[in-house]
Image (cartoon, rainbow, N blue to C red):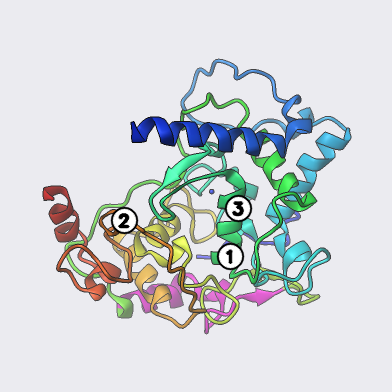
Amino acid sequence: MNYLKSSWYLSGAVLLAGFAGFLLLKKDHSLFSKTHALFPKPRASTSTAWHPPNEKTIPHTDAGNLIRYGKELVAQTAAYLGPKGRVAAISNGMNCQNCHPDAGTRNYGNPFSAVASTYPRYRPRSGKIETIAFRINDCILRSLNGSKALDSQSREMQAMLAYIRWLGHEVPKGSKPEGSGLDTLPFLTRPADTAKGGLVYVHKCQSCHGTEGQGFVTVDAAGYVYPPLWGPHSYNTGAGLYRLMQFATYVKNNMPFGASISQPQLSTEEAWDVAAFVNSQPRPQKEFPADWPDLSKKPVDFPFGPYTDSFTEAQHKYGPFAPIANATRRR
């Protein structure tokens, strides 16, 4: 279940909300105005599957170099923003592409294909209309356990915005191509089993992520060849992967190395169980008290109360989730 190698150098109230989104869109567009001119109009596609644009089309200009730098930041985040980062030491040594493989271009692996076409967008976790910059910083603070957010006007933020928008510039506004986000995974009829998951980990994950989930560091110890899945340098409890459904779906379609949605290497039960095992291990605890202002919008697998239902935190963390989902639909 090894994450992508980081050394391969290489995610009227309606009227008011819409107006707010328009204002945020204008603000976000100002951050990449120089690169926006590089994006031709979306072309008609004969397939619903998304294919990233050809990097050879990126011009050798300042704007094009910003796009390339954005990709570099996604692929080798630790080199620039990790504990020994060249720009700042604000993250845990993991890379963005540990959760967004192939620098955000792998279908069903949290690709960036639909980011430009769907943001700004309302997200119930924050209860706000979020910009792409907001979303990037959310990942830095949660998945990379960052100590601080990037300045929205910094070269690094503008580079990542430019790269993400370039990746999605052929996707029509408001649409999501096939393979964006993650696939769905059937619920188990039982709670996910940490003991069974531990056995899956030993046989299919441990060789890359270590006996203690610590990962393997690069030669210069500036980042990771394979990222840690738990421990002090892994994602914190506020990260999306700390939700069992997110982790299980991600590994089912992407792990171990070589797996894909068409050629998975884990069964559905193995994916749920190994997710339970990994997320039962110690990791940085980080509270985000402003999350889920509307408690009724919490996902069925959100592991922290309070809830608007009568199910326990344990069931919200490990399942079975079908009874919770059914109760939510009846409300």
Disc 1 residue type? Leu
Secondary structure category for the residue under label 3:
helix
Q: Disc 1 designates what residue?
A: 141
Q: Who comes first in sequence, dot 3 or dot 1? A: 3
Marks 2,1: beta carbons within 8 A = no
Q: Disc 3 designates what residue?
A: 136
Disc 3 residue type? Ile
Q: Is residue 297 magenta?
A: no
Looking at this view, name the residue that lies furthest to the front: 12
Please report the residue visible at 75 percent of the width from the left and 71 percent of the height from the top. 89
Which corner quadrant of the image does residue 39 belong to?
A: top right
State left or right for residue 114 relative to residue 93.
Answer: left
Please report the residue visible at 79 percent of the width from the left and 32 percent of the height from the top. 34
Judge depth for marks 2 and 1 and give the one in front. 2
Determine the CA span between mark 3 and mark 1: 9 Å
Residue 294 is tagged as: 2
